[in-house]
Amino acid sequence: MKNKRQIEILKIISEQEIETQEEILNQLSERGYTATQATVSRDIKELNLVKVNGQKKKTKYAQLTGKALTIPEQLLPVFAHGFVSADYANNLVIVKTLPGMAQAVASAIDSLELSETLGTIAGDDALLMVCRTEEYAGTVVETLRNLV
């Protein structure tokens, strides 16, 4: 049942711009699935769904794609302590770090193996990521902020 429900959630977010968990619950209910908000919240986490910019300045759920969507245990403290902020413009993501930490944070980010990221360049206290699309850049920024 869980797998079918999660497949249905992926269908729902690919067909519509879904902004809230409540909207997912309503859509599931209309399609014959019974779930609680807590169940949907767990499904969102397991499916690696993140909020990205949709149309009309609203956010929507989208699936973060990539092979490894977690930072290895030994790199997570480096990322968490070095990360300061992240933002994007068009398809470019800028990550600010503590001085001297950009290369270590870049290594941690590269371990995510984000499929739509073309490359990462690190300096002393900032790094640049080039993504294929602006939408994916927004997804990456949201993901990085959630990892901290």
Image (cartoon, rainbow, N blue to C red):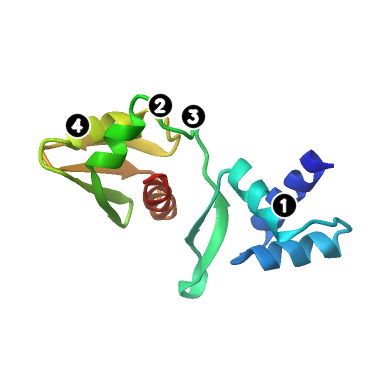
Q: Nearer the viewer, mark 1 or mark 4?
A: 1
Q: CA distance from mark 3 to mark 2?
A: 12 Å
Q: Are marks 4 and 2 in contact (CB under 8 Å)?
A: no
Q: Tell me which label, 4 or 3, sits earlier in the chain.
A: 3
- The residue singled out by tag 1 in the image is 39
Q: Nearer the viewer, mark 1 or mark 3?
A: 1
Q: Residues within 10 Å of mark 3 (few under 14, many from 20)?
A: few
Q: Is residue 133 above or below residue 53?
A: above
- Horizontal side of residue 134 vs 107, given as left or right: right
Q: For the view shown, which residue lies furthest in the bottom direction? A: 56
Say what amino acid the circle numbered 4 marks: Gln
Say what amino acid the circle numbered 1 marks: Thr
- The residue singled out by tag 4 in the image is 103
Q: Tell me which label, 3 or 2, sits earlier in the chain.
A: 3
Q: Tell me which label, 1 or 2, sits earlier in the chain.
A: 1
- The residue singled out by tag 2 in the image is 73
The residue sitting at 67% across, 47% down in the picture is 43
Q: CA distance from mark 1 to mark 2?
A: 26 Å
The residue sitting at 41% across, 44% down in the picture is 147
Say what amino acid the circle numbered 2 marks: Glu
Q: Are marks 1 and 4 in contact (CB under 8 Å)?
A: no
